[in-house]
Amino acid sequence: MKRRAIDWKRSASELAAALPPARLHPAVLAWVEQSPQRATWAVAFSGGADSLALLLVLWAHWPTRRARLRVLHFNHRLRGRESDGDEKFCAQVCAALDVKFIRGVWTRARRGASEAEARAARMAFFEQQARVLWLGHQQDDIAESMLMRLARGSGTAGLAAPRPVQARPRGRVHLRPLLTVKKSEIAAALRAAGVAWREDASNARGDFFRNRVRRDVLAAWTAAAQRDALGGAALARELLEEDDSALEAWLAALRPMAADGSLALGKLQGKPRALVRRALHRWLLAQPQAGELARQGFEALLAAVERGSPTRHSLGRDGFAVIRGGVLRFERAGKRRRRFQRRAN
């Protein structure tokens, strides 16, 4: 039997009635109120339930923005005909909604590519298209991300992800209005609106950590909790973001980083270790020649920063973290050798 064609505009209106603005994250709504009307909005659209719901809700709730809406689909080319089918579906939905569809293709796709590689390629394409990027993450994604990051020992910044309004470099911003909605609620609302979506069969396999958490852990965890564990994780994320923002504001007020990239340790003296740790993280990120520092090495350097005593700590083959006179600086490798040669001459 031939499947009935979907009236996408009508379905978008029905979905918007089930997911009114009051159901969306308030931080995103506040951001929209301040957003210039002529700003271009880009929507990441895979064809799956979450991104489809996001696109339909944006189209229905903000009709004045439709002319400047850009819908982005990235074909990873990792699933053959299924990947091409996703792209075709996304193009058809956009044509029915009369919005601009922009496709990207992973030209360097290879079998066995990691989840991180695929995500990096996809995000690079998305951020080329617009400064404002809308993403379809929802409450299940919060719990999955939290469980994954707990496994690697993340702090407040990592555990507060994904954020509803995420500032990015060069004035870019990522928006996630569906963090207040569970995946099951999104699927139910789409079905009620008579909408079909694309399913990625690879999500059911255990190739990637997130897939394993989603398939094997999340359902058991929520069942064991015997309460709304997803809502609890979402609330914990909000509280962690508040704490993280407070630490960021405190550190910014101290202004320990000088214009030359050095860190004034006196401004951190007597402050909580969480603040000193954050300052050291910021300092390391600001050193382009510093190598990757293992967790044990970071903790050793953190202890030296807290003491403030003279230290010379290796940061890879290109340089050292040097504490001298209560200031932490990056010193390139070979600098001490050149000084010794001048003294010898």
Image (cartoon, rainbow, N blue to C red):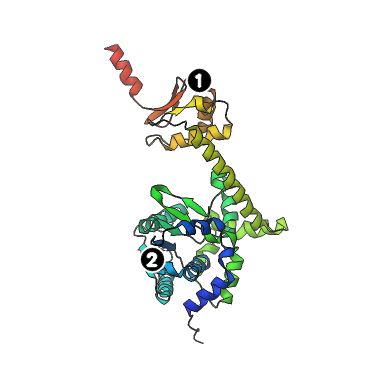
Depth order, front residue of 162/62: 62
Q: Position of residue 47 (x, y in %)?
A: 47, 68
State the SS at label 2.
helix
Tell me where residue 284 sits by quadrant.
top left
Of residue 13 and residue 156, the one placed in the foreground of this image is 13
The amino acid type, in three-letter code, at marker 2 is Arg
Count the marks: 2
| Residues at circles 2 and 1 in contact by the CB criterion of under 8 Å | no
Residue 192's x, y, as percent?
A: 59, 76
290 versus 84 height, above or below: above
Specify which label sits upstream in the sequence, 2 or 1: 2
- Per the image, the residue denoted by label 2 is 68
- Residue carrying label 1: 309
x then y, percent, for residue 147: 60, 51
> What secondary structure is marked by label 1?
loop
Residue 277 in sight here: yes
Q: Is residue 114 visible?
A: no
287 sits to left or right of 27: left
- State the image quarter where residue 26 is shown: bottom right
Q: Residues within 10 Å of mark 2 (few under 14, many from 20)?
A: some
- Pinpoint residue 323: horizontal percent, then vertical percent: 45, 23
- Residue at 50% over, 20% down: 309
- The furthest residue to the bottom: 1
